[in-house]
Amino acid sequence: MATSSTEASSTPQLRRALSLWDLVLYGLIVIQPTAPMPVYGVMSTRSHGHAVVTVMLAMVAMLFTAISYGKMASAYPSAGSAFTYVGRELHPALGYLTGWSMAMDYVLNPLICTILCSKFAMNFLPEVPYPVWVVVFVAVFTSLNMQGIKTSARINAGLVVGMCVVIILFLAVAAHYIFSSAHDGIVFFTRPFFDPTTFSIRPILGGTSLAVLTYIGFDGISTLSEEAKNPRRNILLATVLVCLLTGMLASTEVYAAQLVWPGARNFPDVDTAFVFVAGRAGGRWLFSLINVTLLVATCGSALGAQLGAARLFYGMGRSGALPRRFFGAIEPKSHVPRNNVLLVGGVALIGAMVLSFERGVELLNFGALLAFMGVNISAFARYYLREARKRWFNFVSPVLGFLICMLLWLSLSWRAKVLGIGWIVIGLAWGAHNTRGFKRELVNLEIPDSDGEA
């Protein structure tokens, strides 16, 4: 017994060094303080000028889901993933479905980042055609990821500080513009929340289904369970706080933008509408500053997203979910899954040419909302159905989270649902084939560590 105890204690383990606020800072860095700015135009247009309402409704949905993520992370502290939660609590086939939905998110993220980068670049050089910018950005992101170049945590933290400074500048300039312009009294300030001429539940739900993108990434906190102090308390609390802080900041940014540019009409470019709002409030210098900030932030996201998708395919290839010879290969010098980087780059290139930014966001949220529904039901099954003592909160919170996420999922456009369901059907068919009708052990859909090779 003494020998085994000594061996266990000498085994290298992750150090529990992350405090509650370390976890919150990590979550805010992953989501980024400028998160609502890129999606502002499409959610404002879809909701008929009620963008701030959509952001706040999305926050409610994400808060319930964050509670479920935090509780499940305490149950599975070494494997924080919707794939794991659903597969172990409900059924392996449902876990596979959840993992496959998340895989679509990872593939689409570089695609929508490429669209945005190209649009932001066109704001500076409109004479260069959009397809040329798409090719340029895909080539740059792919070549950098082929060399295994990654941004450091210090650079990422510096970017977040820079974004916060830019946001403060925008809010200050926007406030000056708003209070120095003529308006029709208190109604002017309440119209972003309720405009009787355009308010309608269905468009607002449609806008909210897009606004979910503002919060994507909060679930990453659950992956730090093994490095967090008091993880059973702090993972849950940090996840909820990140959603709450993100929602408050996003609502403030969007509300100010709606007061500067009332309604949701006549944006020169709906995909980069926030940049033009900044230009109206502060002139060319603020237009350029916001545009550069969002371009740099989106480039960083695109680099990480492409490598993340490549690593996911590598994990699936390594475990036999996809052909191992192609997807499970690692380039010896850079230790990068080269085939997968090229494949994801190719998908981004083609997708950015044929999909709109709005459709790409909808498809990404299609997969995310499915995963969120799965996590909520998993939390309901574990903490209410299987618990001897039935606590009302363990019933209400996950059920409300599930129902709100399902309502938002149903509010996606029919085109997005058709494309998304097509992806799900392909995944289920492939999974059933590999597991003989889900009778054998399921393949791993987790993302391997960045340094992991085999």
Image: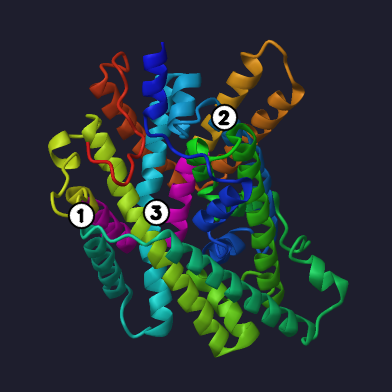
The three-letter code of the residue at mark 2 reads Ser
Residue named by callout 3:
109
- Residue at screen point 22% across, 29% down: 320
Using the image, determine if residue 321 lies above or below residue 336.
Answer: above
Q: Quadrant of residue 322?
A: top left
- Whole-percent x, y for residue 384 in the image: 66, 19
Residue named by callout 2:
74
Which residue is nearer to you in this view: 383 or 396?
Answer: 383
Q: Quadrant of residue 46?
A: bottom right
For the residues labelled 2 and 3, the Cα–Cα distance comes to: 28 Å
Q: Quadrant of the C terminus?
A: top left
- Whole-percent x, y for residue 343 in the image: 22, 51
Of the numbered discs 2 and 3, the one sitting upstream in the chain is 2
- Whole-percent x, y for residue 6 in the image: 40, 21
Q: Which mark is residue 342?
A: 1
Using the image, determine if residue 241 lies above or below residue 135.
Answer: above
- Whole-percent x, y for residue 358 in the image: 47, 58
Magenta span of residues: 343-370
Element carrying mark 2: helix
Q: Quadrant of residue 325?
A: top left
